[in-house]
Image (cartoon, rainbow, N blue to C red):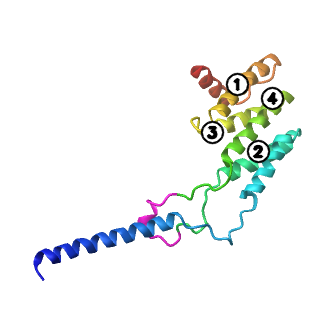
Amino acid sequence: MNADSIKTGIKVGKVGWLLGALLILAGCQTSPVPKSVALDDTSFMGMWTTYRHCEAASDLDTMLLDARKLERVAHQPVIGMGHDMLLPQVMKRWVSEPANRLAVDPKAMAVACSLRTGQSALSAGNYELADEMFQAVLTYPEGMYPYYIHQARQGLTRLNIEANTSDKTALSSSFTAILAATASKN
């Protein structure tokens, strides 16, 4: 064997190892979720039932419970599903969370329910609950949910007007700060 064929063999071996490592990493990204994982309220049907219940409800307490339940599920990280358990710590930073495999966006359901609860609370004169729900909507990324953010800001503006005209005491300092931010954006 000459030196050139040895160098070529070494290069091919390195490329083979690199391709093998990439295939293993790609396989880790696309591995299915084990069937033994219980999804409870995070299953599509559980979340959809809660969302539809929130949309159909007229009782503020029921709507608040549904909104909080959806928000909790929407912000729940996908952990314990076994997608990264076998990877060394050094490699985990290159592995993303599993994609959401539901038919709808859980965060969109949560933000829609919170907005509806805030609007219903405002109509019922429950200004503190309306403030809480509109603020919850504003915690979501504006770029992903511009309609809901805009509606929450409009709700806060209306809340401020109604609270001032009905001689209600000022709500929270964060409410005033949000209104100031809303006015500066408009």
The percent position of residue 28, horizontal first and vertical second, equals 50, 67
For numbered disc 4, what is the local secondary structure? helix
The percent position of residue 39, horizontal first and vertical second, equals 71, 63
Dot 3 corresponds to which residue?
A: 139
Name the one closer to the observer, 15 or 5. Answer: 5
For numbered disc 2, what is the local secondary structure? helix
Dot 4 corresponds to which residue?
A: 122
Q: Residues within 10 Å of mark 2 (few under 14, many from 20)?
A: many
First of labels 1, 3 by sequence position: 3
Q: Amino acid at mark 2?
A: Ala
Lateral position of residue 1 relative to residue 55, left or right? left
Q: Report the quarter where the C terminus lies.
A: top right
Confirm or deny contact between disc 2 and disc 1 (CB under 8 A): no
Q: Residue at x 81, y 29 (%)?
A: 122
* Residue at the outermost bottom position: 1
First of labels 2, 3 by sequence position: 2
Q: CA distance from mark 1 to mark 3?
A: 15 Å
Dot 1 corresponds to which residue?
A: 154
Q: Residues within 10 Å of mark 3 (few under 14, many from 20)?
A: few
Lateral position of residue 145 relative to residue 170, left or right? left
Q: Nearer the viewer, mark 4 or mark 1?
A: 1
Q: Is residue 72 above or below residue 152?
A: below
Q: Residues within 10 Å of mark 1 (few under 14, many from 20)?
A: some
For numbered disc 3, what is the local secondary structure? loop
Dot 2 corresponds to which residue?
A: 67
Q: Which residues are magenta?
A: 85-96
Q: Amino acid at mark 3?
A: Thr
